[in-house]
Image (cartoon, grey):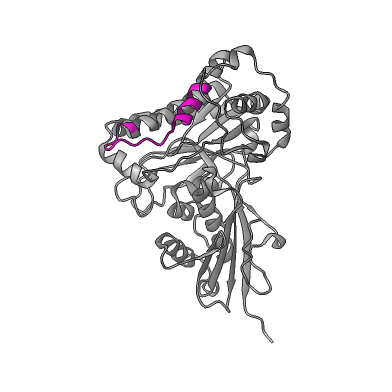
């Protein structure tokens, strides 16, 4: 007896952290997510933080299905997913285009962690769909249509998202600037602060800023292009001091754009501002730029440093934001252990004065990562015999 056609793939995709920000969509770009400016990011490792997606095509399936973090979602009620599926089916072999797909996806990092789950999630989805359908579609374009920043997670290392000029978005793609091996000492920490819920979504904030902030025209026309050129040189030369200065300036610029938006948008909390103060004070105490921060549209700090400085930086953060080890998720646990042996210099132990010590929700660490990876059948989120979703996070 002939068996029905069945194809499957499982993909893990990483988070990325932008140090030159995407903030605003150009005219006509709301549906296709076409940004007003280029952006630049670091891709994190898929260990320990990743989104995983399994996609199965099978003749026995009667409808397209999506299961996300253990819950079945409406495909028809997700216009971006409908668009992605249509694009994939229009660029794949006819025998696969007619098959229905079951997709099961999850994240292995806490939803409260402030990590870019939509970026890793839509990247994993786009990669899995292209592979299982044997589509010729550009993965970064598909990922972008799902979630703008997802296109940057398609590549490892240091990645640029080019704004493009075409109305259809065909030249609005991500490209790798340097791979993970180019600057292996670069390390990212995420300090997740407590008690924050955004009042204004990123999408709404971008719209308001583009319409009302007097800073946006110059940012789009002059500021970002100059920073993209300067930080490209810093990354190329592994010049951390220049990278840190540009990264913090762009983060401050985004905060200023939000403050000059009508009505005013404030994503940072008091803890966020104290982390900014701490970074500048620590760099001054050390006599060099050891640490840099960036903030997205939220309160959580993403901190950049070089691997030899990680133990002291972690000791510093834990001195002011004492976070239990069980809330610290490190790609390399030896760095957390090494921080316990660090004695901070006297000029680094009173940088915030009487600011009360408050534990973080999480403290996370990752090196620069290699990008999405295909996983084995044993790691599938779908039982490949019965096609039943496996709904436990793994």
The image position of residue 338, as x and y in percent, is 73, 28
Q: Is residue 263 magenta?
A: yes
Residue 323 included in the magenta stretch of the image = no
Residue 231 place in picture, x, y as percent: 49, 28
- Vertical arrangement, residue 256 with respect to residue 88, above or below: above
Q: Position of residue 324 (x, y in %)?
A: 65, 36
**Where's residue 150, x and y in %?**
49, 49
Residue 367 visible at all: no
To which quarter of the image does residue 60 belong? bottom right
Q: Quarter of the image holding residue 183?
A: top right
Q: Viewer-proximal residue, 219 or 356?
A: 356
Which region of the structure is painted magenta?
259-279
Decide if residue 391 is on the left or right side of residue 118.
right
| Residue that appears at 39% across and 33% down | 254
Q: Please say if 177 is above or below 393.
A: above
The N terminus lies in which quarter of the figure? bottom right
Q: Give the residue at x 59% y 34%.
A: 188
In the image shown, does 391 or 164 lie closer to the viewer? 391
Instruction: Please state which of residues 318 and 237 is positioned toward the viewer in this rendering.
Output: 318
113 is higher (above) or lower (below) than 224: below
**383 lies left or right of 19:** right
Please identify the quadrant where the C terminus is shown: bottom right
Q: Is residue 98 visible?
A: yes
């Amino acid at each position: 007896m002939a068996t029905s056609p069945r194809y499957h793939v499982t993909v893990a995709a990483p988070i990325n952290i932008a140090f030159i920000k995407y903030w605003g969509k150009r005219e006509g770009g709301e549906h296709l997510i076409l940004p007003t400016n280029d952006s630049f990011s670091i891709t994190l490792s898929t260990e320990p933080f990743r989104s995983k997606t399994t996609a199965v095509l099978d003749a026995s399936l009667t409808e397209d299905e999506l299961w996300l973090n253990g819950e079945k979602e409406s495909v028809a009620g997700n216009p971006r997913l409908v668009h992605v599926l249509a694009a994939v089916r229009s660029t794949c072999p006819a025998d696969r285009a007619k098959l229905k797909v079951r997709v099961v996806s999850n994240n292995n990092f806490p939803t409260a962690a402030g990590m870019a789950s939509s970026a890793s999630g839509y990247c994993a989805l786009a990669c899995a769909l292209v592979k299982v359908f044997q589509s010729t579609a550009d993965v970064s374009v598909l990922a972008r249509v799902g979630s703008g920043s997802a296109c940057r997670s398609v590549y490892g290392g240091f990645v640029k998202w080019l704004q493009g000029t075409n109305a259809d978005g065909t030249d609005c793609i991500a490209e790798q600037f340097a791979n993970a091996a180019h600057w292996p000492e670069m390390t990212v920490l995420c300090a997740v602060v407590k008690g924050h819920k955004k009042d204004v979504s990123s999408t709404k904030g971008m719209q308001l800023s583009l319409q009302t902030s007097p800073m946006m025209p110059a940012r789009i026309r002059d500021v970002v292009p100059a920073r993209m050129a300067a930080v490209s040189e810093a990354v190329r030369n592994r010049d951390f001091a220049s990278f840190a200065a540009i990264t913090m300036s762009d983060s401050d610029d985004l905060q200023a754009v939000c403050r000059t938006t009508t009505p005013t948008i404030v994503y940072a909390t008091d803890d966020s501002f104290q982390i900014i103060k701490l970074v500048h004070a620590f760099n001054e105490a050390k006599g060099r730029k050891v640490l840099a921060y960036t903030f997205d549209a939220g309160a959580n700090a993403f901190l950049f440093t070089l691997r030899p400085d990680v133990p002291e930086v972690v000791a510093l953060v834990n001195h002011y934001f004492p976070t239990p080890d069980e809330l610290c998720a490190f790609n390399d646990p030896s760095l957390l252990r090494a921080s316990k042996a660090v004695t901070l210099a006297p000029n680094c132990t009173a940088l915030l004065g009487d600011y009360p010590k408050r534990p973080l929700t999480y403290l996370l660490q990752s090196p620069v990562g290699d990008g999405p990876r295909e996983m084995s059948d044993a790691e599938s989120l779908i039982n490949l015999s019965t096609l039943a979703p496996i709904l436990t996070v793994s």
